[in-house]
Amino acid sequence: MNESEHMLHYPLGEALAPKGGTLAITPDIKWVRMALPFALDHINLWLLRDAMDTANGERIQGWSVVDCGIHSAQSQAQWESIFANELEGLPILRVFVTHMHPDHIGLAHWLCQRWNATLWM
């Protein structure tokens, strides 16, 4: 056992986002827990409420995605459910990929194309 573990505080206690769904951390941050078909059975992703100025000066509200999940039909289906139920009618504006592991970058192209979103790495 790690001797420092007793110093950790878990503000959500035992709460977990459902696989393929979200858990609101704040109204502007949603924790996405995406299922994976490996021994590591999920990846934690994030939706961050965001705003962006368009070329014509209009400010649009939406979400930024932090990491994408693995490129698979199952992950795409999980995202489609999130799009339908969790985005509060707002678009995906940006996709952030933290690093080049397949479960973090796998669906970046699809998400960017699907939402005409910009990719940030």
Image (spheres, helix red, strand yellow):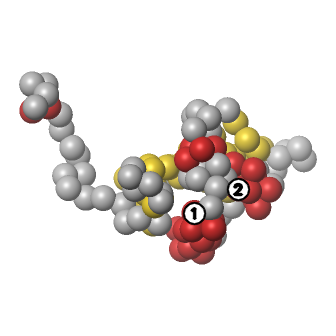
Q: Tag on residue 111?
A: 2
| Image position, residue 73 (x, y; %) | 63, 67
Q: Amino acid at mark 1?
A: Ser
The residue identified by callout 1 is 75
| Image position, residue 4 (x, y; %) | 13, 25
Tell me the element at label 2.
Answer: helix
Q: Is residue 71 above or below residue 81?
A: above
Q: Tag on residue 50?
A: none
Residue 71 is left or right of residue 34, and the answer is right
Quadrant location of the C terminus in the rendered image: top right
Q: Amino acid at mark 2?
A: Leu
Q: Is residue 59 above or below residue 72?
A: above
Question: How many C-alpha atoms fall within 10 Å of the one at disc 1: few (<14), some, or many (≥20)?
Answer: many
Instruction: Quote the CA–CA distance across marks 1 and 2.
Output: 11 Å
Q: Residue furthest right?
A: 56
Q: Nearer the viewer, mark 1 or mark 2?
A: 1
Residue 111 is left or right of residue 74, and the answer is right
Tell me the element at label 1.
Answer: helix
Q: Residue furthest top?
A: 3
| Image position, residue 67 (x, y; %) | 57, 45
Residue 121 is left or right of residue 81, and the answer is right
Residue drawn at 80 percent across, 56 percent down: 113
Residue drawn at 24 percent across, 52 percent down: 12
Decide if residue 26 is in sight here: no
| Image position, residue 8 (x, y; %) | 17, 34
